[in-house]
């Protein structure tokens, strides 16, 4: 241990003073073996008796801002009762005390604060709902304008979004649908074999995939894949001030940004639903043939009698609604992004979560309504 090594000692004096010596600098505190000893000594000095003792800094050779910060933390961001120091050391300690942030205090929330925070969440939800209804109304007005002047519509944007949202999503939706069909067929075969009802696997797979799982699965995949992309694209336009430039130039954001994406998703979602359902049925047929001996020929022959056409009509109708919801939610959160990267990430995450949640809620609503009317 060199003479300028940081040390803390408390000689046998009536006042119990803590005497600091050595060089309390960043370089010396980082020497091997020094910091653990200093930390242990400072922990011993933080007892209730030691907090009111005398701290003597007059024997310090050097003191920089790092050493002053270490002492200030050891004093729990409060000046000791008795402090002996040289005049050059005082400005440094006062500077550290002025700009040092105290540790956050853990406070319990009162029932009134909990109630007020709940009210703030309700107001935020109402604000989102009002903005979403305004966006939906603007979309209806833009569709009326498009119907009156179809040649002036953003058809090139619609074509591009159809490619990016629909065509590029075909491989992943087919793969996931195929695997879901295989898993469902294997799980059902284990139960149907116990009752000798192997042939009913066609009915179960047909109804579940065509009516429910196909549209919902495709919508969830598109919400995570394309819904987040829509929010990120519009959010980046906010960050780069392109939206402000469009407003200055008099370009309607709803007609140029929201309408093409809504049309593209409304057209692409039914096609992707049929594609995903066919892939899932193919996986189910393969697994049924391997696990239960139900041949694809029997599958094709029994499917029309097991699944009515109304189920396919319902699935396609739900897909159009899912596509419009995903497009509107993605555009809604994209337009609400603030001009910073943190808000962009939060908006993209919220868009995906809300889109998937709304898809499941609307699917449940469709199930209840269709059950009541006998479909």
Image: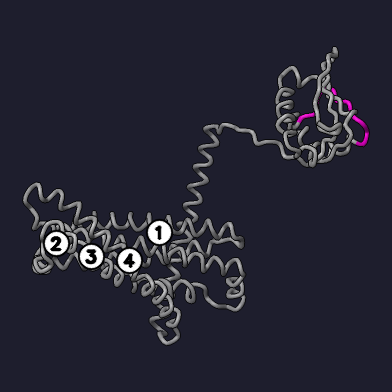
Residue at which label 1 appears: 355
CA distance separating discs 2 and 3: 28 Å
Foreground disc of the pair 1, 4: 4
Q: Which SS type dominates the magenta stretch? A: loop
- The crowd level at tag 2 (other Cα within 10 Å; few <14, some 14-19, many 20+) is some
Residue sitting nearer the eye, 74 or 77: 74
The earlier-in-sequence mark between 3 and 4 is 4
The location of residue 201, given as percent across then percent down, is 13, 57
The image position of residue 240, as x and y in percent, is 61, 69
Viewer-nearest of labels 2 and 4?
2
Give the CA separation, mark 1 to mark 4: 17 Å
For the residues labelled 1 and 4, say whether their Cβ atoms are less than 8 Å apart. no
Marks 2/1: CA–CA distance:
36 Å
User: Which corner quadrant of the image does residue 199 belong to?
Assistant: bottom left
Give the residue furthest to the left: 196
Q: Which residue is mark 2?
A: 289
Badge 3 marks a residue whose secondary structure is helix
Q: Mark 1 touching mark 3, by CB under 8 A?
A: no
Residues at marks 2 and 4, CA–CA distance in whole angstroms: 23 Å
Camera-side residue of 1 and 251? 1
Residue carrying label 4: 173
The part of the image, by quadrant, that contains residue 337 is bottom right
Which circle's residue, 2 or 1, is located before the other in the chain? 2
Picture disc at residue 314: 3
């Amino acid at each position: 241990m060199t003479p300028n090594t940081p040390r803390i000692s408390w000689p046998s004096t009536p006042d119990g003073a803590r005497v600091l010596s050595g060089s309390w600098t960043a370089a010396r505190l980082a020497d091997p073996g020094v910091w653990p000893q200093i930390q242990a000594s400072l922990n011993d000095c933080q007892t209730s008796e030691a907090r009111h003792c005398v701290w003597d800094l007059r024997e310090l050779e050097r003191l920089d801002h790092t050493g002053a910060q270490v002492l200030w933390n050891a004093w729990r961001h409060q000046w000791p009762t008795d402090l002996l120091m040289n005049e050059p050391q005082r400005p440094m300690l006062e500077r550290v005390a002025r700009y040092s942030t105290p540790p956050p205090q853990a406070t319990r929330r009162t029932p009134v604060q909990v109630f007020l925070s709940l009210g703030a969440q309700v107001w935020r939800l109402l604000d989102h709902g009002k903005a979403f209804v305004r966006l939906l109304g603007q979309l209806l007005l833009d569709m009326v304008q498009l119907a009156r002047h179809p040649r002036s519509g953003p058809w090139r944007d619609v074509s591009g979004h159809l490619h990016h949202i629909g065509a590029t999503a075909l491989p992943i939706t087919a793969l996931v649908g195929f695997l879901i069909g295989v898993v469902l067929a294997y799980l059902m075969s284990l139960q149907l074999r116990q009752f000798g009802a192997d042939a009913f696997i066609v009915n179960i797979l047909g109804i579940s995939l065509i009516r429910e799982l196909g549209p919902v699965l495709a919508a969830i995949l598109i919400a995570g894949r394309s819904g987040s992309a829509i929010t990120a694209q519009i959010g980046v336009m906010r960050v780069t001030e392109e939206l402000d430039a469009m407003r200055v130039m008099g370009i309607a954001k709803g007609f140029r940004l929201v309408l093409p994406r809504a049309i593209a998703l409304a057209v692409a979602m039914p096609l992707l639903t049929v594609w995903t359902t066919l892939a899932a049925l193919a996986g189910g047929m393969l697994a049924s043939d391997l696990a239960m001996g139900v041949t694809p020929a029997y599958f094709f022959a029994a499917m029309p009698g097991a699944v009515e056409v109304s189920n396919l009509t319902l699935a396609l109708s739900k897909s159009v609604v899912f596509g419009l919801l995903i497009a509107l939610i993605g555009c809604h959160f994209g337009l609400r992004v603030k001009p910073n990267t943190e808000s962009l990430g939060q908006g993209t995450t919220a868009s995906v979560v809300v889109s998937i949640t709304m898809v499941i809620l609307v699917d449940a609503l469709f199930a209840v309504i269709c059950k009541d009317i006998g479909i």
